Image: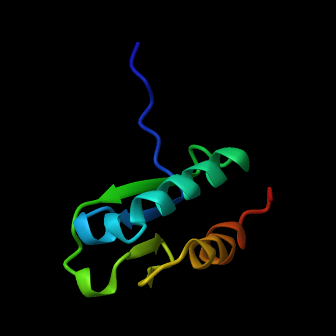
Amino acid sequence: MSKEFEVPDKVIYVCTGSKCKKKGGKDIGKMLRNMIKDMGLKGKVEVVKTECTDRCDFAPVMSFQPDNVWLHHTTEEQAKQAFKDHILKSDDQV
């Protein structure tokens, strides 16, 4: 029996290219994954690690879809706020 291919409602792309990773991209991605798990949003929201987005001068870079919001020089605090603004704002379960 094959699994169903699930498509999340929202996706957060986090650059984990060398500069973004060094400046906190990997840790931010991990933090966001934990928030998704803790809030019971697994399957609805997904964090996708990307390789270099060619925006190394702005590291770490991340994007919230489908809102098409891009963050640069992102701190953990900014990532948490963006999560609230772009993931939780339209989720009635939270």
- Above or below: residue 94 compared with residue 85: above
Q: Quadrant of the C terminus?
A: bottom right
User: On the picture, is 84 further left or further right than 8?
Assistant: right
Q: Percent from the top left, x then y, of residue 18?
A: 23, 65
Q: Is residue 40 visible?
A: no
Residue 55 or 76: which is nearer the viewer?
A: 76
Specify the quadrant of the image occupied by residue 25. Answer: bottom left
Q: Residue at x 73, y 50 (%)?
A: 39
Q: Residue at x 43, y 24 (%)?
A: 3
Q: Percent from the top left, x then y, of residue 84?
A: 69, 72
The coloring applied to the image is: rainbow
Specify the quadrant of the image occupied by residue 55. Answer: bottom left
Specify the quadrant of the image occupied by residue 62. Answer: bottom left
Q: Residue at x 33, y 66 (%)?
A: 22
User: On the picture, is 12 further left or further right than 53?
Assistant: right
Q: Percent from the top left, x then y, of residue 58?
A: 33, 86
Q: Quadrant of the N terminus?
A: top left
Q: Residue at x 50, y 63 (%)?
A: 28
Q: Is residue 86 visible?
A: yes
Q: Percent from the top left, x then y, of residue 40?
A: 71, 45
User: On the picture, is 45 further left or further right than 94?
Assistant: left
- Above or below: residue 1 compared with residue 34: above
